Image (cartoon, rainbow, N blue to C red):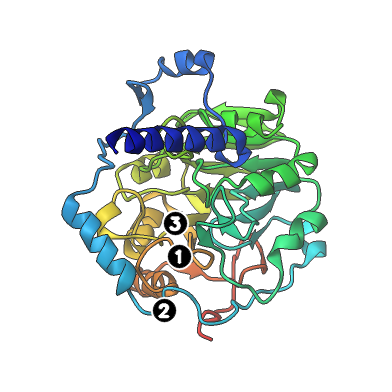
Amino acid sequence: MIIYIFSFIILLCVVITAFIKLNPAFGGKPTKEQIEFYKNFNNYVNGKFVNETPTSLGMSASDILSMLKDSITGAENRKPHGEIPVESIDWEKIKSEKDSLTWLGHSSFLLSIDNKKLLLDPILSTIASPVSFAGSKKYKYSENILDIIDKIPPIDAIFISHDHYDHLDYKSIVKLSSKVSHFFVPLGVSSHLMRWGISKEKITELNWWDEMNYQGLTIALTPSRHFSKRGIFGSDATLWGGYAIIGKNINLYYSGDGGYDSHFKKIGEKYGPFDITLIEGAQYDRRWFWAHMKPEEAVHAHLDVKGRNMMLMHWSAFTLAYHGWKEPIERALKEAKKSEISLIAPKIGKTVLLDSNIDVPFSSWWDF
């Protein structure tokens, strides 16, 4: 009997390994040459990227048990009960030369800065997973946001913050690739793109604080406190971060994912003040406080980076934690009011002009 069980386990491991290798959605692995290059950096230790603040990814047995309990009981309204109202995209406004921002849900944005069309973490698929039969499914929207790839104008650059499935989507990247001039990614993430057929010449890898000029824009990868993992085994083989994107009239900060830490003040000192900050503040939990910020922490991060206007992201698309789906924006609005900051909350699909007076009439569109 023991030999049969042992044989079954070996066979299962072989099948899983083969499945991962054959399924391109899992991505690739950094080459030996890349790994040797990464060893030159102080945020790459013992074959893994590390946070500025030492961070343990482990969970205690009690944490795991409490998660199982929360999976059953959990908060009410973890998912919306109906379709999320989405505004029809104004393509003429996006194609104009005016600086603008269009939220596509979760942490995906279509930007126009200095008439350069930019995409941030585009995930336009219906599920954040390498397979269709398991994973977090995207909420239903009143408009089909998934068909924008066919209508989207040529994209000057895509920016990827890290390689988790709710930020780096295989199907979206492959379908967008012919429309995109260049990709900016943290160290190691190019291995995924190259497996998906993106040429090396179209990809720029960046380490934290790396800065470059791209078609007149200043681009910098900024630190975050997070982690990376694409396959079933191993983690932190690729880097994670956020971006400062500086144009002639707009200075924008995109936080990527990550817990609250001292890096925000450093970013503010180096690149602030920012006209608009896009900051994650959802999918939080006390058991992974280091990976995602609470809404109140997101507001504090906005203040740390010296932001003028803030937009909360990482919500309204997937249920990846145990809080209510609209709790993040409600808590963020309360904290923003207390801290006397401007927090905008446009509908998904609405294009916001990034002029000297960024103004979005308030509407609690999430109450339906």
Q: Is residue 129 visible?
A: yes
Direction from residue 206 to residue 126 in the image, left or right: right
Residue holding disc 2? 77
- Give the class, few, some or many, for how many residues have Cα within 10 Å of label 1's Cα (few <14, many ≥20): some
Instruction: Establish if 368 lies above or below 235.
Output: below
Classify residue 168 by image quadrant.
top right
Instruction: Establish if 153 lies above or below 283.
Output: above
Q: Position of residue 127 (x, y in %)?
A: 57, 58
Residue occupying image coordinates x 45% and y 19%? 38
Q: Is residue 114 visible?
A: no
Q: Residue furthest bottom?
A: 368
Quadrant that contains the N terminus: top left
Label 1, secondary structure: give it.
loop
Residue holding disc 3? 280
Whether residues under marks 1 and 2 lie with C-beta atoms below 8 angstroms apart, the answer is no
Residue holding disc 1? 319
Q: Position of residue 70 (x, y in %)?
A: 29, 68
Residue occupying image coordinates x 62% and y 37%? 24
Instruction: Establish if 141 lies above or below 108.
Output: below
